[in-house]
Image (cartoon, grey):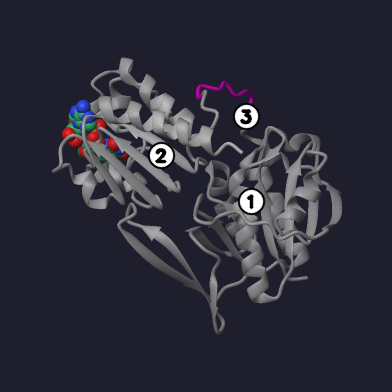
């Protein structure tokens, strides 16, 4: 049975947002190819409502590969299982999220399933005769690249925040299979995770990001950034020098050498807009820049700009957002 298969990423018992984006893209892709969507989850235990949740976002079938050694996640073991399933079931397509684990698993699957790898695509591939064409961001957000393949199967990863998750409810069929990883796929194992990020909203999944740079003058001034982020339900980020001097933790550093994000709204405060910073944020859907220098390069890529002192503008903006939310609470 040919299908658009999806790897379902589960974190702390919940479906990650990139998985819902991938399901949405897979549904569009499957509809254009007249194929079903098969969602594949791997693990030792699964959330009780997993099948129903996947059905809400368009899965026709849910396959659970279950085994005690599948937790915690080991990329090679997951990849082998997915490749094996693709071969056995003759799935033509597999879509994974372009997350840390998705981007690590996908190349293994492509090799073991003898597939073509389309990595970091931003929308479902489109068919032109026997060729599939896909679009992705290239050269640190400075270009769009079209990639194409005539080969099957296709293994693709979808860049986070490229697609808005959309419900497309159906009642999926379910199947559960036991899976024991090969010993050679368990050479490396996660033996413990110590959390350093305390954000409620993970930066890579956030729809809104409030980011600040050296214009803030010192770490003691980040309270107003966190207040604004809280009012908006946003994650916080920063420029590289700010992380380098220890004003903010390194996991908040965005840019060419940091995390690359594409939220719906990126608010840059006291950041000049150097090319290396833009490389990580320029594909954000809306960019708001707050800077006291009207010549700051960031204004050239801004959708909205406020020329002003961050120490005056940010508290006023936070207050205005709070008031707006209070007035529109019901
Ligand atoms: C190989 C390489 C890789 C790099 N990778 C990255 C990367 O991944 N990410 C990254 O961010 N940088 C990166 N950089 C560094 C980058 O070139 C810039 O130096 C850096 O982004 C500047 O950080 P900034 O905008 O916070 O500071 P600055 O350039 O010092 O800018 C501060 C801004 O704050 C404004 N400002 C000052 N006071 C106020 C105020 N009161 N209110 C409002 N605005 C104010 C100023 O007008 C200025 O525009 C890299 C550099 C190199 C060479």
Magenta-drawn segment: 191-197
Mark 3: few/some/many CA within 10 Å (<14, 14-19, 20+): few
Identify the residue position indicated by label 1 in the image: 20
Q: Please identify the quadrant where the N terminus is shown.
A: bottom right
Image coordinates of residue 140 in percent, x first then y, are 33, 52
Mark 2: few/some/many CA within 10 Å (<14, 14-19, 20+): some
Quarter of image, res 209 = top left
Identify the residue position indicated by label 2 in the image: 259
Reply yes or no: does residue 78 show up in magenta.
Answer: no
Q: Secondary structure at mark 2?
A: loop
The response on whether ligand 1 sits within 8 Å of label 1 is: no
The response on whether ligand 1 sits within 8 Å of label 3 is: no
Q: Does residue 24 appear left or right of residue 220 in this picture?
A: right
Task: Write down which quadrant ligand 1 falls in.
Answer: top left
Give the CA separation, mark 1 to mark 2: 21 Å
Residue at 37% x, 26% y: name it: 225
Mark 1: few/some/many CA within 10 Å (<14, 14-19, 20+): many
Q: Secondary structure at mark 3?
A: loop
Mark 1 vs 2, N-terminal side: 1
Quarter of image, res 50 = top right
Mark 3 vs 1, N-terminal side: 1
**Mark 3 or mark 2, which is nearer to you?**
2
**Mark 1 or mark 2, which is nearer to you?**
1
């Amino acid at each position: 049975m040919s299908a658009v298969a999806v790897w379902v990423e589960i974190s702390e018992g919940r479906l990650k947002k990139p998985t819902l984006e991938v399901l949405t893209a897979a549904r569009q892709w499957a509809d254009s190819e007249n194929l079903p969507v098969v969602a594949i989850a791997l693990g030792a235990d699964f959330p009780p409502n997993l099948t129903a949740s996947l059905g809400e976002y368009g899965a026709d079938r849910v396959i659970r590969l279950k085994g005690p050694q599948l937790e915690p996640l080991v990329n090679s073991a997951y990849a082998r299982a997915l490749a094996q399933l693709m071969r056995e079931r003759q799935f033509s397509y597999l879509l994974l999220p372009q997350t840390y684990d998705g981007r690590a698993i996908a190349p293994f699957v492509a090799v073991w399933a003898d597939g073509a790898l389309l990595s970091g695509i931003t929308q479902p591939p489109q068919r032109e005769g026997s060729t599939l064409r896909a679009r992705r961001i290239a050269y640190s957000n400075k270009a769009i690249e079209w990639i194409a393949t005539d080969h099957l199967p296709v293994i693709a990863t979808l860049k986070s925040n490229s697609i808005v998750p959309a419900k497309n409810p159906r009642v999926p069929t379910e199947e559960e299979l036991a899976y024991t990883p090969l010993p050679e796929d368990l050479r490396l194992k996660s033996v413990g995770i110590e959390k350093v990020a305390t954000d409620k909203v993970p930066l890579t999944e956030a729809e809104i990001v409030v980011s600040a740079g050296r214009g803030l003058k010192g770490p003691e001034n980040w309270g107003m950034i966190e207040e604004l982020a809280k009012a908006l339900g946003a994650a916080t980020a920063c420029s590289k020098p700010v992380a380098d001097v220890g004003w903010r933790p390194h996991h908040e550093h965005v840019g060419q050498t940091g995390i690359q994000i594409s939220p719906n709204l990126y608010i840059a405060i006291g950041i000049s807009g150097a090319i290396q910073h833009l490389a990580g944020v320029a594909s954000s859907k809306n960019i708001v820049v707050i800077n006291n220098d009207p010549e700051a390069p960031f204004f050239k890529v801004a959708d909205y700009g406020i020329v002003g002192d961050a120490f005056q503008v940010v508290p006023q903006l936070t207050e205005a957002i709070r008031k707006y939310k209070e007035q529109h609470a019901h």
